[in-house]
Image: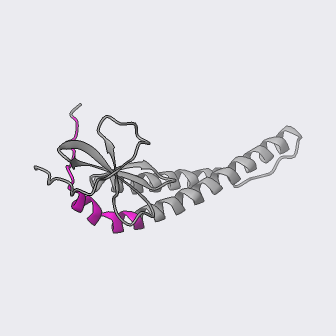
Amino acid sequence: MTRKKRRIFTLQEADALLPELEKRLKLLRTKKEAYSRTHDLLFMHELVCTAERTNGVLEEKDDLEDGIHALEGAIEDLAKDVETIFAMGCLLRNIEKGRVEFFGKHEGREVYFSWQLGEPHISHYRPFEGKVHERVPLSGKPATKSQK
């Protein structure tokens, strides 16, 4: 399997994507919350239906199967939204926090510029070998231009 070549961002290129990413992440979080609520409701409905069947109360037709199909469609929709974010060249690290990373170079080292929903611009990075949750504040120096 060949590994896809990673886009190398300058800090300015990554910052330029933030308005679009913010819009997409807010929509993705809204969809995920709706999916989670629907999933929980279907789970509870399935428990009730199972209890009714176990106790001899048989409904002619319940809407559980329709709900499951709708939930599967919602999963596919979420997957497309996530894939769209990855197609922009960045890495979606955490949907709930809205954390995104961009591969780049800072002070001559390979890093992941780290941005989180609600931040006005990229002000952190993660060392290339660092843990996913690690975020180090950027120094006052501008990021180096990437070589393409």
Percent coordinates x, y for residue 56 in the rendering: 88, 41
Please, which residue is most extreme toward the front here?
A: 140
Examine the rendered structure and indicate whether residue 41 appears above or below residue 16: above
**Residue 62 location, x and y as percent?**
73, 53
Residue 44, percent across and down? 74, 49
- Is residue 64 shown left or right of residue 24? right
**In this orientation, which residue lies closer to the viewer: 9 or 105?**
105
Above or below for 145 versus 49: below
Identify the residue at horizontal 29%, vertical 63% (top origin). Answer: 15
Q: Position of residue 109 (x, y in %)?
A: 21, 42
Residue at the (22%, 56%) spot, across then down: 141
Q: 97 or 6: nearer the eye?
A: 97
Was residue 45 drawn as part of the magenta stretch in this picture?
Answer: no
Q: Residue at x 57, y 53 (%)?
A: 71
Magenta segment boundaries in residue numbering = 3-23
For the point 47% across and 60% down, the residue is: 28
Residue found at the very far left of the displayed protein: 147
| Residue 64 visible in the current orientation | no
Number of on-image labels:
0
148 relative position to 143: left or right: left
Q: Quadrant of the N terminus?
A: top left
Residue 15 seen in render: yes
